Image (cartoon, helix red, strand yellow):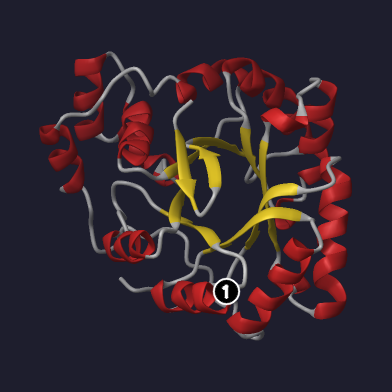
């Protein structure tokens, strides 16, 4: 599979995310994801399915060295007495000694970014995370994290899809050597139904969803795909056998819109750049 490199990390360009999936769904679909070729799995403490992912990977006999595991620390654990303990719990549930990538899930507001980064660095230095990164940070917060962090910030995981291409943040990340990880790539179901993406896909024998994922990885982003249906997994990963041309990319670029953002929870979200 294609990979993205950032500050020494080599990350599979297509990951399998388990946001809003029950334990039963995770344990049913992960074996199919492994069989299809997925090795990058993305979860979070707040998803409450780290243990299910750990069980599924263990039961399937996945080799730890073959996997790239990402999890995220929830804002309720942004305190010195809770941060490291919460990571220990995540490791126990995932049945590993170390995650490949540990992220700060949201910037929040009560704990300064500098303090969040210090706690993140401490658990990385303790060997609990190979690499560290951030999620849902705006440009200023990302730059502060980069400046404050002793370990390189390898990614900023943000909402990114054809209706919200995040050009300013992407440019700032690239200037700093930070990879962008795109979540909500299907825009909550809008991408698979988009007539422009459907027309493009028809020319390649691909679905609109595959076009959306291909658009992400073709720009050099890491894309998180998701399905709870084992029969759909193979479709999600079958995006590396075609290339969108310049006209396709231009047509998709025109889908961007000012109200494209879908995820902005009060109390968690920062002041966005756009």
Image coords of residue 52 (percent x, y): 80, 37
Which residue sits at x=13%, y=42%?
Answer: 250
Q: Which residue is mark 1?
A: 107
Q: Nearer the viewer, residue 16 or 264?
A: 16
Placement of 76 over or under 73, stated as above or below? below
Picture quadrant of residue 171: bottom left
Which residue sits at x=48%, y=25%?
Answer: 1
Which residue sits at x=30%, y=54%?
Answer: 165
Residue that sits furthest to the left in the current view: 247
Element type at marker 1? loop
Counting other residues with Cα less than 10 Å from the Cα at mark 1, is it few (<14), some (14-19), or many (20 or more)? many
Q: Is residue 136 left or right of residue 70?
A: left
- Count of marks overlaid on the render: 1
Q: Nearer the viewer, residue 265 or 153?
A: 153
Image coords of residue 238 (percent x, y): 43, 19
Placement of 253 over or under 212, stated as above or below? below
Which residue sits at x=30%, y=71%?
Answer: 274
Q: Is residue 160 left or right of residue 152?
A: left
Q: Nearer the viewer, residue 72 or 220?
A: 220
Image coords of residue 80 (percent x, y): 82, 79
Q: Is residue 95 left or right of residue 227?
A: right
Placement of 201 over or under 261, stated as above or below? above
Q: Is residue 13 left or right of residue 101?
A: left
Image coords of residue 233 (percent x, y): 55, 21
């Amino acid at each position: 599979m294609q990979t993205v490199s950032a500050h020494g990390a080599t990350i599979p360009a297509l990951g399998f995310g388990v946001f809003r999936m029950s334990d039963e769904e995770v344990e049913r679909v992960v074996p199919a994801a492994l069989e299809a070729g997925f090795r990058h799995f993305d979860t979070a403490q707040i998803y409450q399915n780290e243990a299910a992912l750990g069980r599924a990977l263990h039961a399937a006999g996945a080799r730890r060295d073959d996997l790239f595991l990402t999890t995220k620390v929830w804002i309720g654990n942004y305190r010195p007495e809770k941060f490291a303990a919460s990571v220990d719990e995540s490791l126990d549930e995932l049945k590993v000694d170390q995650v490949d990538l540990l992220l700060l899930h949201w910037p929040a507001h009560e704990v300064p970014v500098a303090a969040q980064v210090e706690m993140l660095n401490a658990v990385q230095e303790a060997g609990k995370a190979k690499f560290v990164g951030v999620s849902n940070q705006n440009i200023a917060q990302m730059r502060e994290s980069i400046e404050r962090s002793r370990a390189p910030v390898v990614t900023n995981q943000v909402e990114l899809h054809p209706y919200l291409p995040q050009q300013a943040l992407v440019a700032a990340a690239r200037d700093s050597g930070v990879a962008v990880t795109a979540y909500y790539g299907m825009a909550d179901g809008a991408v698979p139904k988009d007539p422009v993406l459907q027309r493009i896909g028809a020319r390649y024998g691909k679905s609109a969803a595959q076009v959306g994922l291909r658009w992400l990885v073709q720009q050099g982003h890491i894309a998180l795909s998701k399905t709870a249906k084992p029969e759909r997994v193979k479709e999600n990963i079958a995006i590396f056998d075609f290339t969108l041309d310049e006209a396709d990319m231009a047509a998709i670029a025109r889908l961007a819109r000012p109200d494209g953002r879908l995820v902005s929870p009060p109390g968690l979200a920062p002041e966005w750049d756009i």
